[in-house]
Image (cartoon, rainbow, N blue to C red):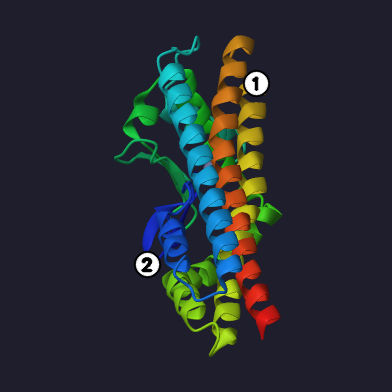
Amino acid sequence: MLWYKFSGKASKCHHFISKSYFFSVGFEVVINLPPFWKRFLMNSILLVSLIFLAISFLVSSALKGKFTRYAQIPLAKGLSGKEIAEKMLRRNGIYDVQVISVNGYLSDHYDPFKKTVNLSPDVFNGRSIASAAVAAHECGHAVQHATAYSWLILRSRLIPFVQFSSNIVQWVLLAGILMINIFPGLLLAGIILFALTTIFSVVTLPVEYDASNRALDWLETDNVTLPQEHDKAKDALKWAALTYVVAALASIATLLQYILIFSNSRDRR
Ligand SMILES: [Zn+2]
């Protein structure tokens, strides 16, 4: 739940599988390949896409269910998300990061550019296990930033490339597939651009898991959560992290399929 500047506007890293993948996958079905490969690719692309779409839907539904449930369980210590965030930042020696409230449901994120922990109203004002887990997780990103955590640095360095890639990658892939017999290099360029977004989604995984681990460690050591509350906070963050795992796996699967299309076309030449 760390935001980054993407396509010129701020957007969440907490993206589920991009719908555009599935639209581009639909276009691929019309590519001019021999009937056998056409059938094989069409079946596998649609099947894999549908499987990931279903998994993504199930995981995000489960996540919403967990958060709704844990948002109704009040924290024994009674601290609000804002108080927890400020406490965790101070405990980690961070005094130049502000905790502010932003509109939206599950819109919580740490902004490394403005140095703000942005919490949705439910989390900012909430005094539940869910709000404690989310507030501490976002502060985990602030601690990563302050301590120059290597995966976060790598992720930040990838952002300009991913921004560039995300603006054009679907068009390059589509044009590359349509022109596969005339200009195969275009599909290869599209694959390289797409690989950047795949690497980005994989690098996001240690960043997200580490932020949750920092949050859970601190919640426990500073006795902000009681043992039974701690297990629930852990469960909520586990499901949040799973959505990133699904997104990364979907990205890897899509990348492999483009590579498959490219290698099949090479075999026919
Ligand atoms: Zn996060």
- Which quarter of the image is occupied by the C terminus? bottom right
Q: Are marks 1 and 2 in contact (CB under 8 Å)?
A: no
Report, in whole angstroms, how far the alpha carbon at label 1 lies from the one at label 2: 38 Å
Please state which amino acid type lies under the numbered disc 2: Gly
| Image depth: mark 1 or mark 2 in front | 2
Residue underneath mark 1: 220
Q: Is residue 126 left or right of residue 66?
A: left
* Residue 145 appears in the figure: no
Determine the image quadrant of residue 184: bottom right
Label 2's element? loop
Residue 123 place in picture, x, y as percent:
39, 29
Q: How dense is the environment of label 1, judged by Cα within 10 Å: few (below 14), some, or many (20 and up)?
A: some
Residue underneath mark 2: 8
Give the mark nearest the N terminus, 1 or 2. 2
Residue 17 place in picture, x, y as percent:
48, 50
**Residue at 52% in and 67% down:** 162
* Residue 77 appears in the figure: yes
Q: Nearer the viewer, residue 189 or 230?
A: 189
- For this orientation, the residue located farthest to the bottom is 182
